[in-house]
Amino acid sequence: MNLSQVTGCDDQFLSVLGGSHRLHPQVVAAFERLQVSAATAGFELRAVSCYRSFERQLAIWNAKAKGERAVLDIAGKVLDRNRCNDWEWVQAILRWSALPGASRHHWGSDLDVYDAAAVTADYRVQLISDEVGPGGVFCALHDWLDTQIEGHSAEGFFRPYAFDGGGVAPERWHLSHAPVARSCERLLTADALFALLEQQPNFELWPVVAEHWQEIYQRFVLAPLSAQAQLAAGRGRV
Ligand SMILES: [Zn+2]
């Protein structure tokens, strides 16, 4: 992997999963093996979101920065732009959306999943905590995935957003393929990402991001790494 690929600026390395999604070739193979294993346990493991480009992430960022797309608080309630200063607004966006160039979905290693066997064909997956938590429609799948991850039977997948470390919100639906993701994490340094972002002509709220750069990088880009460390140390999980 190189920096262009890791920041979502080059998609030539991707393979197709299930006709419509794209992932790193190694991750397609691993996810297909995990799907077979899930099927034996009665689940129809499917991807809802896989690779996302820099341009797509920038469009999401800009829409949220301008208040054209909903920005949610920690409880999932819609926030009022007029009641937040610019720095509060940037942090609220970052809780649920990555900076362009810093989304794990750029890497082809990460995807959001659900259980198609648990819902009707016309069900629209929302990717909210009510779906994946206790009593949620996809809770059984995620309990099974937890067991596979803990037993090292998850084909290399783990949960980078399992914990709330004061940055990115917990996202139980988000899986990451460790062997590919680790090589990407090493390339995504604070300086390389800053250099890419400061040359973007249409990046809303960039002066606010630049002013708080070190804190943003620590809390919202590096946070998944500390979640892995917690997991490795065997502390409780969410
Ligand atoms: Zn995700």
Image (cartoon, rainbow, N blue to C red):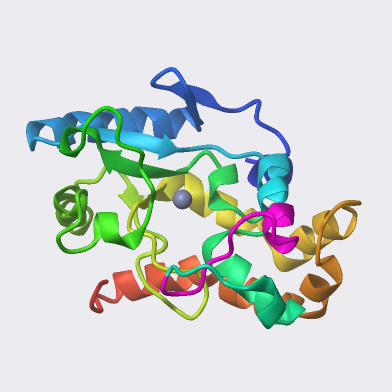
Relative to 82, is 97 on the left or the right? left
Relative to 162, is 213 on the left or the right? right
Quadrant hosting residue 66: bottom right
* Residue beneath the point at 82% across and 56% down: 203
* Residue beneath the point at 43% across and 43% down: 111
Q: Position of residue 228 (x, y in %)?
A: 39, 67
Q: Position of residue 85 (x, y in %)?
A: 73, 82
Which residues are drawn in magenta? 61-75
The answer to whether residue 13 of the structure is visible from this angle is yes
The answer to whether residue 2 of the structure is visible from this angle is no
* Magenta-drawn stretch contains 179: no
Magenta stretch, main secondary structure class: loop
Relative to 220, is 143 on the left or the right? left
Where does the N terminus fall, quadrant-wise?
top right
* Residue beneath the point at 61% across and 76% down: 218
Q: Position of residue 211 (x, y in %)?
A: 82, 79
- Give the answer, above or below, for where 128 lies relative to 166: above
Quadrant hosting residue 133: bottom left
Relative to 2, is 154 on the left or the right? left
- Residue at the left extreme? 41
In front of the other: 7 or 139: 139
Q: Position of residue 41 (x, y in %)?
A: 8, 38
- Give the answer, above or below, for where 42 lies relative to 194: above
Quadrant hosting residue 219: bottom right
